[in-house]
Amino acid sequence: MWFKSLDQNKKRKRLLDKTPAGALRDYYQTPFPAPKSKVADIPLVVLDFETTGLDIKYDHIVSVGLIEINQLGVNLDSAWHEIIKTSRDLPEQSTVIHEITDDMVNLGEEVNLVFEKLLSRLKGHVLIAHHAQIELGYLKKISKELYQQDFIIPVIDTQVLAKRQLQREQVTLEKNSLRLFNLRKRYKLPAYKAHNALSDALSTAELFLALMADLYPGLDCRLKDLLKN
Amino acid sequence: MDIELQEIHDFIARNTLFDELPDSSLAILVKNITIRYLRRGQVFPPEGLPKKHSPEKHLYIVRSGVITLRDAEGNLIEKLAENDSHISQCLEVSTKTTGLANEDSLVYLIPCSLIKTLREESTGFNSHFLSSAEHRMKHAVEKRQQRSDSQNAMRYLVCDLTDRKPVMVQSSETIANTATIMTTENVSSALVMEGENLVGMITDRDLRSRCIAEKLDTQSPVATIMTKDLITVDDKTILSEALLLMTRNQIQHLPILKNKQPIGNLSVSDVIRHLGTNAAFIASDIEKANSPEALAKISQRLPELHVQLVIANTSASQIGEIFSMITDSITCRLLKLAEEKLGPAPVPYLWLAGGSQGRNEQTSHSDQDNALFIDDSMKPDDDKYFKALSTYVSDGLNACGYVYCPGDAMATNPEWRQPVAVWKKYFSNWIERPEKKALMLASIFFDLRPVYGETALFDDVQASMLNAAQENGIFIAYLVANALTHRPPLGFFRNFVLIHDQEHDNTLDVKHRGIVPIIDIARVFALSKGIKAVNTVERLQAACECGAMSKEMSENLIDALEYIAMLRNQHQVERIRAGKPADNYLDPKSLSGLERGHLKDAFAIIKSMQEVLENRHQTGRIA
């Protein structure tokens, strides 16, 4: 893992050379946090996307929620929520889940502007998400579409951390036991109204703090211990 | 603020600590929250992380979990649960506390620098941070009294008015039988059921217009003439809404459902009766009552009056005056009825009330304490008359809900039905040869107030009693020792000391451990300074006026009494509304974090006054 992350900084430099001036290039100019740094000392950003579906190829992002963790505290003033404008109609099912309607989406922000803002927020940070391959997948897809370049970032996946902890405690994993909602229940975190990108990001952030405290009671852990392989 | 943080915003807005902040400040507050997670066993306040952690101090709010706080010596000071806040780091003089998470806890941190700014903007908010318990107490009492009464005037729920189960018949029942049932139950309407389901209603009017006038066979099922498609309301409907429904639809009856089951049938006359349940109406009804039974019936409205007064935010001292006034009226009426029955008294007499009625501090839940002073010209044989008179009145009061005094401090007891000369001797004995046990009962008689009869019979006794008491240091010392027997249920480290028994587990007896100690303190000052007043607030004010007690202490005790009595009233009214008898056992868990804090402040005020008394009178030697 350690060398993989080292590779990430190398990879970042390679991408930096290939990327023309613009937001993505700015993003790649800031180094990723060193894998050996203490998690408590590095800036973390928790991200959640609400999407029209799970098929990254065909589906797209409806809204973005983001919140930062610094020194193992979630800062509410860093909260950011944005609805993304899209030309396509929303499938009815996803409207029901996210309570975001076509009208709201039409009022939303253009995807390229949202991505630019995202890049500036993610710069120099480690990304945290629950089941991160969705968020990462969409980021890569948009990056390809808008900049014809790959997108990379160090990632901590709370679902992976939770799985590690549950297995350590020899809990039998059931179908839904790794879902955000059930994990929060397990750590006695308050129930939030689910499925809004920002409240899910907040939920994930709190779950991350709980998992950290559970996995490393002294909170003494290094980034390389948590990075997703 | 992002609307998506609404849940945190709502949580903060519900916390009484912030209820005087404008919305704009709340939004800023929420934005500045940092969320921390503490695993069970972790130190609180959460230590920062090495080196870089900013030295900023915070106000903490527990979102979930439990945190215990200890002082520098490691003694337990307080337990913080959901919604509780820890403000000590933001105080000017902060005490060093350390804590531990007893459960996995989620904690919100707000920087003290922001709290400081908000305090400067709102005096109400600022009052929570004033250093002394007294300041916080004062503000809490004032704030309650400021709330507008009119806003709440109609906020009664329909279930507050349903004192009887509705009369119900099955839809297959004959019209004739239904009419019989309604007649025996003495009601003008009945609900028609099909098994468990409400399907209709039948009224006197239906019987007349749809059956008799139509010459219908009275053996037909009642379903044929009932009114179907009823308008009903849920038991938690506000009364004013129900009234609106009735007028708008021109209906006289409104079935009340709880979990789809009828629990009452509200009639227009219920509402009118309810609107008439105010003290003035009750007093005038008492004047007209012709029998103890009629008085007993009127007094059934007292719990409802209690609910009404508390909902309208009437102060506890006013509630005490109103209920004592009503008890006085009932007592006077009973005495007049007794005189009508027994003939005029052979010699002048005076009926006096003691205890809470004497002090004008009753609630709807009080027992009776009374005494009879008889003119010295009485002959031994005259006692027969007074015995009959006392029995009549005491039984009448008992039937009205003022149960017999468990300590037998009533005029029915021959000891407390005596000529003035004997009473004088009683008082001088108590004062000159005080005994702890006798004093406990006698405390009822040091709060006597004339209610009916020859008031002059009391004046002389009171004057000589006050004279003798003031001059007798030993008596006062005994009185102080007695006043210290009830201590507030506050542990050494500001934790509540709860009752642990089967009946009242985990509660506080707010009467004996909160209200009584203040009453006792006030009595000490009254008797040692020759103060005639018996009402506790008046005694405390007089003690301040004559210089025996500092202005602050007098005001603090008055505020503490008002606050505890207010919480007791609220608790009793909740019990009444839940159909349970009113009592004095308060579960601190039923209070908000802020209320718990105020209650502790009130107890702390009592405690400090008791300590002053203890030092001043050196009661150790007596107790």
Image: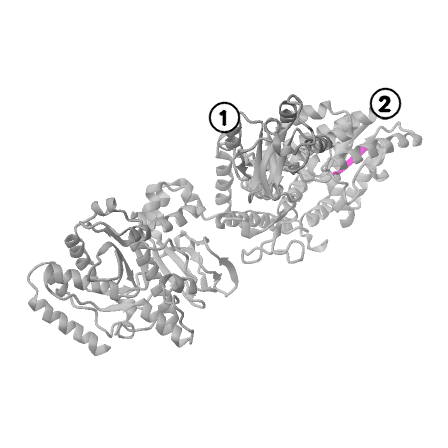
Packing grade of label 2 (10 A; few <14, some 14-19, many >=20) is few
Given the image, what chain letter belongs to the residue carrying mark 2? B
State how far apart marks 2 and 1 are (Cα).
Answer: 56 Å
| Picture colour scheme | one colour
Can residue A36 be seen here? The reply is yes
Occupied quadrant, residue B423: top right
**B439 in magenta:** no
Residue B399 placement, left or right of B535:
right
Given the image, what chain letter belongs to the residue carrying mark 1? B
Numbered disc 1: secondary structure: helix
Magenta extent = B368-372
What number is the disc on residue B248? 1
Kind of residue at disc 2:
Pro
Residue B241 placement, left or right of A33:
right
Occupied quadrant, residue B492: bottom right
Mark 2 or 1: the one toward you = 1
What number is the disc on residue B47? none
Q: In the picture, which quadrant includes the C terminus of chain B? A: bottom right
Q: Position of residue B617 (x, y in %)?
A: 66, 49
Numbered disc 2: secondary structure: loop
Kind of residue at disc 1:
Arg
Can residue B309 be seen here? The reply is no
What number is the disc on residue B344? 2
Q: Is residue B35 above or below residue B308?
A: below
Q: Is residue B67 above or below residue B554?
A: below
